[in-house]
Amino acid sequence: MVLEWEEHLLLLDAGVLFPTAEKPGVDFIVPDFEYLAERRGHMRGILLTHGHEDHIGALSYALAAAPAPVYGSRLTLGFARRRLQERGVRAELKTLRPGEPVEIGPFRVHPIRVAHSVVDSLALAIETPAGVVLASGDFKIDAQAKSEERTDVEALSEWGNRGVLALLSDSTNVEMPGLTDGEESVLPAFEEVLARTRGRVLVSCFATSIPRIQNVARLAATAGRPVAFLGRRMIDNTETALDLGLLQLGGISRLDPAALGDGFASRALVFVSGSQGEPLSALSMISLGEHRDVAAGPGDTVVLSARAIPGNERGVSRLISNLFRLGCDVVHPGTARVHVSGHGNRDDLVELLQRTRPRYLVPVHGEYRMLAQHARLAAQAGLPADRVLVAEDGDVLSLCANGARRETRVAAGRLLLDRGGASEIEDLVVRDRRHLSSEGIVVPIVVVDRQTGQLESPPEIVTRGIVDSAAAAELVEEASRILTGAMDGRPVEERLDSELTRERVRDELRRFYKRRTQRRPMVIPVVMEV
Ligand SMILES: [Zn+2]
Ligand SMILES: [Zn+2]
């Protein structure tokens, strides 16, 4: 999201989207920052609300489009710094602290502490010449949390008193009733697992869930278990948090991952990355019995302390089955209270609305259905319908002291990237991959005489992914016969044009396979002239 006043632009968060199985071979998706690139000279800053991948993962791409200073809390910048180093990108990083406003061009940005599943998360009240825009970031109220971790509701109320022009509020959990539970609510389930497990306890949560890692590490120490961290992201993030003093492991005995195979590590508690079933993660390797340092089995318990992100459900389910196959016990959010959301439920959202009393509400974060339901919730809470603006990617909202309206749209797409992240995958490539994976492929090899355009020999046809091999052989023979007939019956001028020949081969085989298999395989003719 971009906030714009005259020729001054602020970017709010720069995250990645994780692809679903409908995009084979795509590893992550970033926003198309063309809009920024066209206005590079006007970029004043990039504001980060918190350190989750869906808020900071595309930072290096945003900086490449339009360099600008990056603002965020200590932990957010700590995570961002590592990502930028990995990509060899430099940026000026400026720390935001709750209660300490910063001036950026014509904007004055006030960071406000909010509770979320990663510590050091911020809402941002941005004073603009048109009024105050308050972006909640991802948040829940969590009134029971420690004072340095809970949402600063007093500050939100103060902004309500001063007057908020527009509230941009998290919609992720709008379908959940009541208030979201506090982070502490997961502890009893962990205590129970620690008490009944004879062997090791492997805990897989998001590597950004620093408060949870802190709490569970303390429980492990109380239970006399040493702790260890496994997986690159888990190790990187906990080191960053330790450096900043946001994770404290004083008095807790720690093991090196390489020592986890030793006998004395048999009761360790290991934080492992891979709660989403990512194929190359430490937990996936363990579940397949292929991890270098850790073999899990009977007596061990694996706790999946995260919900599956939509699209990852099948991978996570497979992971759980593989762990059971090894003889482990597996505890997950479907069976025990080992995860609590970092996003506010309906009552949290209403509380934010009532404290900030904005003139306009713009529901953000979440799928369209959530934005739409957030708009209804606001109406129930008393905000007139014409004060709620539901916007999608590319929509431009124009706000001023005496009104708000939707302007024309601007181009705002997404780029599909593979693991290396260097080159863009075009939509066409993804469509082809999907076509191949669902329909298979047919490659006819046709050899013709350069002088006469006559077939030199019956066409050879190679197929993959269509029918089983015995039936395929018969089909291929039949296809070759039909193709021979079609080729021989053509007028000379068509026979001598290799482009027309290719076209004809494609048409004949498409029709043939459609008729015989009800499939539409991709047909790639190879025509050789001799
Ligand atoms: Zn988040
Ligand atoms: Zn988020």
Image: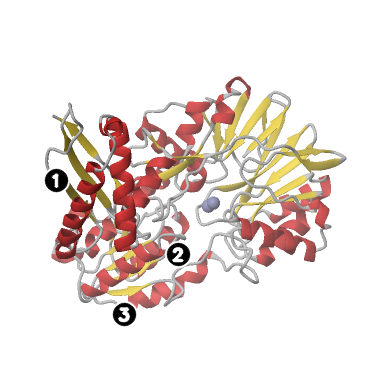
User: Where the N terminus falls, by quadrant?
Assistant: top right
Query: For the residues marked 1 and 2, what is the alpha-carbon distance in whole angstroms?
Result: 57 Å
Q: Amino acid at mark 3?
A: Arg
Give SS at disc 1. loop
When asked about the image quadrant of residue 190, the answer is bottom left
Q: Which mark is residue 307?
A: 2
When asked about the image quadrant of residue 98, the answer is top right
Mark 3 vs mark 2, foreground winner is 2
Instruction: Tell me which residue sits at (61%, 23%) in the image.
Output: 39
When asked about the image quadrant of residue 180, the answer is bottom right
Name the spot of residue 519 as percent of width and height, x first.
Answer: 34, 59
Query: Horizontal placement of 39 versus 452: left or right?
Result: right
Q: Amino acid at mark 1?
A: Pro
Mark 1 vs mark 2, foreground winner is 1
Q: Nearer the viewer, residue 438 or 34?
A: 438
Q: Nearer the viewer, residue 394 or 229?
A: 394
User: Where the C terminus falls, by quadrant?
Assistant: top left
Q: Residue furthest bottom?
A: 196
Q: Residue furthest right?
A: 402
Instruction: Tell me which residue sits at (49%, 46%) in the image.
Output: 51
Name the spot of residue 290 as percent of width and height, x first.
Answer: 17, 59
Query: For the residues marked 3 and 1, what is the alpha-carbon distance in whole angstroms?
Result: 70 Å
Residue 358 drawn above or below residue 196: above
Residue 230 drawn above or below residue 195: above
Give SS at disc 2. loop
